[in-house]
Image (cartoon, helix red, strand yellow):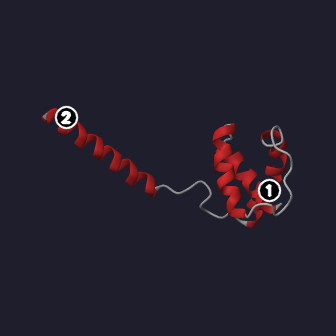
Amino acid sequence: MRKLFITRKLFVTIVLAGVALGSLSRPVFAQAPSKEEKRRLILKGSKLWPVYCNQCHNARPPGEKAPYEWDQEIMHMRMLGNIPADDARALVEYLKTR
């Protein structure tokens, strides 16, 4: 019984430490890019869209989604499509400008 209590206590400690450390890390898209960086990302995203997105999706009309909605979409598709973080950031900047 005591061994089970110690195991639970250790598990709870590890989970809480993970949550605390996770809350300290910044999200992927937290920092707004500079104007020059944004141009570079948009150009890169326009080249990556046919590679990652056009295989399954048709082009969406501009303004169909609000910019914040693209953040949610790209995180979901990043997992499904195995998209690297740098490419996902370029894609989301491109999609927000359309």
Q: Earlier in the sequence, mark 2 or mark 1?
A: 2
- The foreground one among 54 and 1 is 1
Residue 33 location in percent, x, y? Answer: 69, 63
**Amino acid bearing label 1:** Ile
Answer few, some or many: residues within 10 Å of disc 2's Cα (few below 14, many 20 plus, some between 14 and 19): few
- The foreground one among 70 and 28 is 70
- Residue at 23% from the left image edge and 36% from the top image edge: 7
Residue 20 location in percent, x, y? Answer: 38, 54
Q: Quadrant of the C terminus?
A: bottom right
Left or right of 33 on screen, residue 64: right
**Amino acid bearing label 2:** Leu
- Residue at 86% from the left image edge and 50% from the top image edge: 59
Left or right of 12 on screen, residue 53: right
Q: Which residue is mark 1?
A: 42
Between tags 2 and 1, which lies in front? 2
- Residue at 65% from the left image edge and 54% from the top image edge: 72
Residue 12 location in percent, x, y? Answer: 29, 45
Q: Secondary structure at mark 2?
A: helix
CB atoms at circles 2 and 1 under 8 Å apart? no
Residue 39, quarter of the rendered image: bottom right
Residue 13 location in percent, x, y? Answer: 28, 46
In the image, residue 16 above or below residue 56 = below
CA separation, marks 2 and 1? 54 Å
Residue 33: numbered disc: none
- Residue at 76% from the left image edge and 55% from the top image edge: 41
Q: Quadrant of the N terminus?
A: top left
Q: Secondary structure at mark 1?
A: helix
Q: Residue furthest bottom?
A: 35
Q: Which residue is mark 2?
A: 4
